[in-house]
Amino acid sequence: MFTSIINTTTGVTIGSALICTAAAVILGFLIALVHMKTGSYTRSFVLTLAVMPVLVQMVIMMASGNLGTSVAVLGTFSLVRFRSVPGSAREIASIFYAMAVGLAMGMGQVFFGVIMAIIVGVFIILLNLIPPAKSRSLEKRLTILIPENLDYTDIFDDVFQKYLKKAELQSVKTTNLGSMYELEYVVMLKNTAIEKEMIDAIRCRNGNLTVICGRGQTISTTL
């Protein structure tokens, strides 16, 4: 059903190259728009997404018809390493999205690439419309520093009972040469509006030392 517009006998022609390039440019704009509509973004990253399908298409098309094709594909996908360290999961997914479209265009599978790009783009937008679970938004990781002379076993029990649905102590470790304890809890707030009030109440107990409330937050103390 899906056939390449590149003739395996004559190879890449000017006409087929222009069609693939035009399709890659249009789909690059589509991918950039999808990324912009589904969260925060930077201008440089959006521009990179827009131009990536064309660049991948050029690399694959230049190597088409010989053993270098596989080498070109591996080299192209190695670019993900450039973004995988500092980038978010959404950015990495967008990189793969753009590269997959570029690969399709480079192999002359224009119709297949267009259909798949539209389907994936719609799917990403629909997933982004799903609201996060309320219970997940209320679940936090709470990290508290206390002096070594405080007994951490029940010092915050009344505060937790007032503001939290649950509080599970995950870890206890000493810090600052043993002069402090770092307590890490997984908690669930009764209401997001009372988070500041809870932190203020904790600060009154721990001598106004560091309190962090968030997802995946930890304290790194150097005093």
Image (cartoon, rainbow, N blue to C red):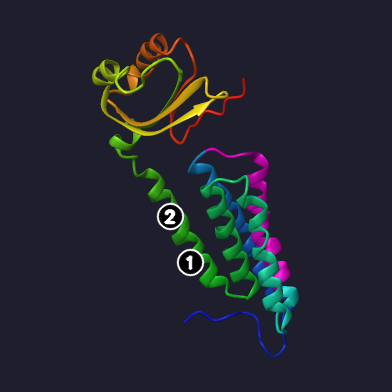
SS under mark 1:
helix
Q: What residue is pinned by disc 2?
A: 122
Which of the marked residues, 1 or 2, is nearer the chain's N terminus? 1
Which portion, as a residue range, is magenta?
40-60
Q: Which of the two residues, 32 or 67, is positioned nearer the viewer here?
A: 67
Kind of residue at disc 2: Val
Vertical placement of 17 versus 152: above or below?
below
Q: Which image quarter is the C terminus in?
A: top right
SS under mark 2:
helix
Query: In percent of the image, x 48 and y 32: which residue is there?
Result: 217
Q: Which of the two residues, 187 or 91, is positioned nearer the viewer here?
A: 187
Query: In percent of the image, x 36 and y 21: which residue is there?
Result: 152
Q: Which of the two residues, 97 or 105, is positioned nearer the viewer here?
A: 97
Measured as percent of width and height from the top left, residue 57 is found at 68, 67
State whether residue 155 appears in this view: yes
Measured as percent of width and height from the top left, residue 198 is found at 35, 16
**Where residue 115 is drawn, which disc sits there?**
1
Query: In percent of the image, x 69 and y 91: which residue is there?
Result: 9
Kind of residue at disc 1: Ile
Rounded to the nearest whole Å, what is the CA distance between mark 1 and mark 2? 11 Å
Main secondary structure found in the magenta portion:
helix
Query: In percent of the image, x 41 and y 55: which residue is there?
Result: 123
